[in-house]
Amino acid sequence: MSILDSKIPEGPLADKWTKHKNEINLVNPANKRLIDVIIVGTGLAGGSAAATLAELGYNVKAFCFQDSPRRAHSIAAQGGINAAKNYQGDGDSTYRLFYDTVKGGDYRSREANVYRLAEVSTNIIDQCVAQGVPFAREYGGLLDNRSFGGVLVSRTFYAKGQTGQQLLLGAYAAMNRQIGRGKIKMYTRHEMLDVVIVDGKARGIIARNLVTGEIERHSAHAVVLGTGGYGNAFYLSTYAMGSNVTAAWKAHKRGAFFANPCYTQIHPTCIPVSGDHQSKLTLMSESLRNDGRIWVPKHKKDVEAIRNGSLKPTDIAEEDRDYYLERRYPAFGNLVPRDVASRAAKERCDAGYGVNKTGEAVYLDFASAIERYGKEQAYVKGLDVNDKKVVTELGKKVVENKYGNLFQMYEKIVDQNPYETPMMIYPAVHYTMGGLWVDYNLMTTVPGLYAIGEANFSDHGANRLGASALMQGLADGYFVLPYTIGDYLAHDIRTGTIPTDTKEFDEAEQNVRETISKLINNKGSKSVDYFHKRLGKIMWNKCGMARNEKELKEAIKEIAELREEFYKDVFIPGTENEYNEELAKAGRVADFLELGELFAKDALERNESAGGHFREEYQTESGEALRVKEYQYVSAWEYKGQPSEAIHHKEPLEYENIEVKERSYK
Amino acid sequence: MMNLTLKIWRQKDANDKGKIVDYPVSGISPDMSFLEMLDVLNQELIEKGEEPVAFDHDCREGICGTCSLYINGRAHGPQTKITACQLHMRSFKDGDTIYIEPWRAKAFPVIKDLIVDRSSFDRIQQAGGFISVNTSGNTQDANAIPIEKEHADKAFDAATCIGCGACVASCKNSSAMLFVSAKVSQFALLPQGRVEATDRVLNMVKQMDEEGFGNCTNTGACEVECPKGISLENIARMNREYLAASLKG
């Protein structure tokens, strides 16, 4: 029997959430005023939770390391947000969204959580429209939809290429309303550096003011982490420069189990690496795969000619191109899920068909979309559909309308015009499905400590479908946590304010001060980035798109050695009592150096391929991921001093409403 | 590869007077972004045991609005419709001298070097930049009110503001009218936002004035330098909204 109690309510799948809401404890409005909640992170999950809890009447303290809550990295999400509205009448339903998500996650997510997510998805769209989020609309004034990978319906709502920013500004506006009313106290440019546990419960945090360097104590009756994912362990990723694992990792060290750390999403359509100076990678939205076709040349001689500049991609005839996704996956074509598309790109590039100098790029081509749209427009306008010039011009306009800002972004970075020549893309680290283990109530293994959004592990299994991250962040923050946290806080109505002058706060603060002092006084010779880049190389080469036993074992050893070297030889200029970005970075990289090892250990333990976790030893004859039935569980790791000593716990996954099948997109 | 001379504003903290300091950098590739060029400089400074140049940055893909560099006298540098993090070194040539300063405005005090405090923008939004609906999910169906595509598109265009503050930095009066009008316009153009339109514009403008931003004299520098191309039309719309609200209120 597992020690992990997922607390999934009894009863039929479709009734679980309603039944649970009816049965859990509530806190009366007068008592909510007596209860404090700390929320760390102000992205879609943290921001929406802060606003909602404050509206309900709790006293909220919210923290972010950015200079404003509006800048959390949810803002960079481009393509859209899923919801089972079935506005298109194309057969969508709560069940189908649930089914697609479980299958997309390669049968490694929890049924009850995913069903609830699908169930509340429709409320999100209603809520956001009421808040004034300017979603794209059709000429009739109703909301428009598009398709994302791994599904056969159009259920994605969007605001051009910046859906994330618009949804975040909605949550930020809702927060602002509560900040203005004094119900949220906002701490910007603050970083959480420890959780304080009193009598086994999370009762506060230690935070550092990034401007002054002051160490602060903050108490509350519950602590919520909406602190995002840990993809920056790879150094190069589509994450923001500041995105980090520190809050989640400190929670892990205080007793929160870390689930499935090896489940990482590598997004197929990012701008390829251009050189060693590179600090981050830029995503090109999955929505582009609605209209873009992915290919490489069929013949090696053409690849050579492209690399040495004697041939342009537009010179290659249709029959000499290999549209490998359409070839391998005729049913889903260019819209296969991300893990499948990424691996297929790697397979072609490893075979020597990569189209740039580094050999790590494939084409994403809009020529046929431009022609198709152009002909449609020419027909509507009564122009000659055989006039290539007219058709191309009209088609470009349609494509510009849909993806203009993405095309512009590409051109600024690569200095090539994607209307004229196909884009070059390659997979990059984008999202982490793993995270802190939570039960159905989104509580971690530490009572009173919650994890929401990307920071938890619960909904996406081994692979997340496009446009589902925004959905989960807002579902957790607006519609799930505000109910479930009440069940816990109902026991705290008579507790009173948690004092911060206790031995538990003393100990936690001391712990933070010692860590900082150790780093800042280290007389090393190498910068923080030097170590971060080296960690990134190990992660990408040995824990990336394809993994194997030998290299994972090497990675574990190399990361542990690198961590030792870091503490011996890192140098941080300046002092701890001022704005010091290097010091903040050092603390984050120190945590990545521990997480990275646990990541590799988790990948090594999982002797199967599932979603984003691809073990070379476990693949079908055609190179697809091969799941192994006995690994149908969540791995949850308990901290015991060093990552190598972490204890492995299992939460078995049961599928009662969905048949576990081979995941096929053919 | 390029060699450049950087003239960078260094200021220890809010109380320090600050000054321009010269730094030579070499081996800069045209494929680097402007911030990656600064990374190169900072790594060199750290290796020499010196303090790196502090500058704000986060997403490095032009959407979070954190980066805020005044480059050769222009907010976000010589190109239009991009942020400093999207600016690439191919916009410069070997031997160039580049001045790098923080946003300059009374309402944006310097924190350190090139970092300024833009919390005044947050406070303006807190004064009214929202629609007062609770996040219960018990609102009406999202398609219950059709919205004319033209209005929805214009509201979206206004909503693309990333809150970077380039408009303020570019304005000779340090006016925040483009920023405030973008938010006012987004809501004014949507039926959901009309309900509170009167109070919203009055409260946001009042807060804007209290923060110490200057007035608008219609020179239009803000529109030219805005990385998201927010249109001056929004300022005109806000003025109409403000006038109507003042007469009503």
Image (spheres, grey):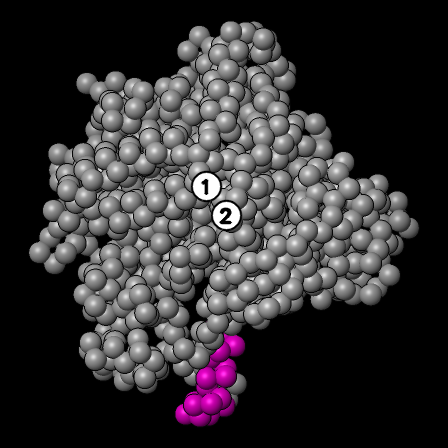
Query: In front: B42, or A202?
Result: B42
Which residue is rendered at x = 53% and y = 11% of the image? A506
In magenta, the rendered stretch is A383-399
Label 1 sits on a secondary structure element that is loop
Which residue is rendered at x = 48% and y = 71% of the image? A415
Residue A501 shows in the view: yes
User: What chain is tagged by disc 1?
Assistant: A
Seen as rendered, the residue at the extreme right is B247
Q: Mark number for residue A314?
A: none
Residue B46 percent across, percent down from the top left: 52, 43
Residue A499 percent across, percent down from the top left: 58, 9
In the rendered image, which residue does mark 2 sit on?
B43
Query: In front: B235, or B99?
Result: B99
Residue A454 percent across, percent down from the top left: 41, 39
Q: Amino acid at mark 2?
A: Gln
Q: Amino acid at mark 1?
A: Ser
Label 2 sits on a secondary structure element that is helix
Q: Mark number for residue A527?
A: 1
Q: Quadrant of residue A526?
A: top left
* Quadrant in which the C terminus of chain A appears: bottom left
User: What chain is tagged by disc 2?
Assistant: B
